[in-house]
Amino acid sequence: MSGTSMDGVDLAYCNISEENGNWNYEILQTETIPYEEKWRVRLSQLRKQNALVYLKTHTFYGHYLGQICREFIEKHSLEVDFISSHGHTIFHQPEAGYTSQIGDGSAISALTGLPVINDFRVLDVALYGQGAPLVPIGDQLLFSEYDFCLNLGGFANISTHSEGQRIAFDIGPCNIVLNRIARKLGEAYDEAGKIAASGSINYELLKELDALSYYQEFKPKSIGREWVNSEFWPKLREYEHNQVPPENLMKTLVDHISGQIADAIEHYSGADIANKKVLITGGGAWNTTLIDHLKSQCDAQMIVPDNDKLVDYKEALLFAFLGVLRLRQETNTLASVTGAQRDSIGGAMWGDFNRLLN
């Protein structure tokens, strides 16, 4: 799993089983491979390159993923059935009919000698869906004891059950913008929210961010880096040019993000919000300032699990689960979440699956 915050590649070795309709999981081994600067730059700039550079990077990145998977497997002496790979999103504009996650599945399979499932989003977009979020089917089947599942990655996204069906959407940007501010101060990220804690809220900027049209409706919707660059980041740049200190921008972003999350939870909770349980995972779960702001703005029960592997690798686990459902020819993408014409079974398969299918 490689997210929009571009910290690195998350690897998770998972055991997933089903008995009488009840699913169980274990996250047995994990590792994050940080991106070297050359990969971080190439991935962040790829959307601006020509078709030849794009195709080469798709292939080379697939070989890179295959290499680190092979090393991970050998390092921990793992017995693996197949690899489920999200890849790295370069383009995501479902309203225009396309999404693209690079990382050639055939290259991963060739380097590891294992079957591979990848390219999970394109079928849903072809069915006029958002292609995101995809993990809510896992939230529904693996984490049903929670009323909400909130992931604080590059983007903040949430899933819940409403009117008899699973729904989910991207709330807004999270670490993708927080990390940009941190890098201006020479840090990869805002550890424990210390930078934000030292700043003050700029209420003019906060008002402008809260007024962005994306936030005005609750429905199947998703955003990508393109939206951040065209709609969100220019507002921050304006205040940055007006000499607003980075720590104040960070504090304002934290308050904005937590406020939008609180609005979403309240919208689907009603008067019973104090009894609602919210599972919080993703890198943003370690941002103490962000979590404190969220708790102060929302009366629901905010739960960051004690299991560090679950906090950091839940999304990797759930893409492994999407692969299991794909292998079993069971629905792994919900139209109620994405707005597609119908539920679907997404994912391209590479390599020899005969042993697993038989």
Image (cartoon, grey):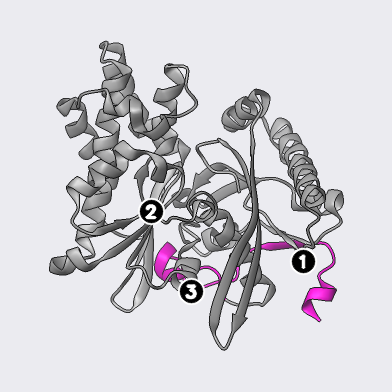
Mark 1 crowd level (few <14, some 14–19, many ≥20, 10 Å Cα): few
Residue that appears at 42% across and 37% down: 175
Residue 302 seen in this snapshot: yes
The x, y position of residue 194, in whole percent, is 34, 28
- For mark 1, give the secondary structure: loop
The x, y position of residue 309, in whole percent, is 54, 53
The three-letter amino acid code for the residue at tag 3 is Leu
Q: Earlier in the sequence, mark 1 or mark 3?
A: 1
The x, y position of residue 187, in whole percent, is 47, 22
Label 3: which residue? 141
| Majority secondary structure of magenta residues | loop
Q: Earlier in the sequence, mark 2 or mark 1?
A: 1
Closer to the camera in the image, 10 or 332: 10
Label 2: which residue? 304
Q: Is residue 237 above or below residue 264?
A: above
- For mark 2, give the secondary structure: loop
Residue that appears at 25% across and 66% down: 276
Closer to the camera in the image, 35 or 295: 295
> Looking at the rendering, in which quadrant would you find the C terminus?
bottom right
Q: Which mark is residue 195?
A: none
Q: Is residue 102 above or below residue 264?
A: above
Residue that appears at 74% across and 32% down: 52
